[in-house]
Amino acid sequence: MTTKNVPHVADRKLALSHIGVSCFDLARMEDFYTRVLGMTVSDRGDLPAEMGRLVFLTTDPSEHHQLVLASGRTEGTINDGPVLGGSFGTAIFQLSFRLESLATLRRVQQRLVAEGNTNFVPLNHGNSWSLYTRDPEGNALELVVDSPWYVHQPSGEFLDLSLDDAEILRRTEELCRATGDWEPYETWRERIARRIGADQACLR
């Protein structure tokens, strides 16, 4: 199963651009996001007056950067333990990365296991399939694949990634239908696109 591209919203004037994360160990974090998760460094450089160093990463040629790693993190500690749908109580709740298919999700999990990371919480949200874990500095990561359906959130039950795609799809449709409040994702996207355009009318 592969995620379809979402069309551009004609009336949208504002969109989330990127996320920045301060790091204790910039080199280790860059290694994780490039070597393990496959992101591409698009730029890097030092800030003036020795304020720190930045590394810019992307997976989208239309976005110079989607993630910025910054040196000089001073607050907080490195968290460990399960990520139950996000890292509640921390400065960064989660960083979410969309993957194209369940097969890709399984491959990323295998790469993380090869790094010694076995701290996973897999959840079926109905509208998506997610694997929650942490990066080397304890920031919660969500690796997510869209399903074909929308269902009211929050929603979640255990996701068994050892099942094949067809069985995961069957169980997900069953989960969504059981709520009585579901619809094809494309229908929901069309509806939310109209709302986005209306909400951003003030920017036109």
Image: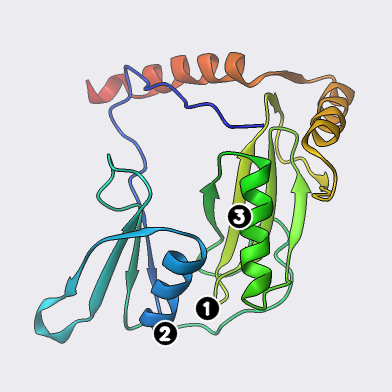
Report the label total: 3
Amino acid type of disc 1? Answer: Glu
Element under label 1? Answer: loop
Q: Which residue: 37% across, 18% down?
A: 197
| Residue 111 visible, this angle | yes
Q: Which residue: 72% across, 30% down?
A: 152
Q: Position of residue 38 (x, y in %)?
A: 45, 59
Along the line of sight, which residue is nearer the eye, 104 or 90?
104
Residue underneath mark 1? 137
Q: Position of residue 195 (x, y in %)?
A: 46, 18
What coloring was used for the rendering?
rainbow
Residue underneath mark 3? 142
Tell me the quadrant of the picture where the N terminus can be found. top right
Q: Quadrant of residue 11?
A: top left
Amino acid type of disc 3? Answer: Glu
Q: CA distance from mark 1 to mark 3?
A: 15 Å
Tell me the quadrant of the picture where the C terminus can be found. top left
Q: Position of residue 68 (x, y in %)?
A: 33, 63
For residue 86, side relative to residue 67 (left or right): right
| Image: 170 above or below 92 | above
Residue underneath mark 2? 24
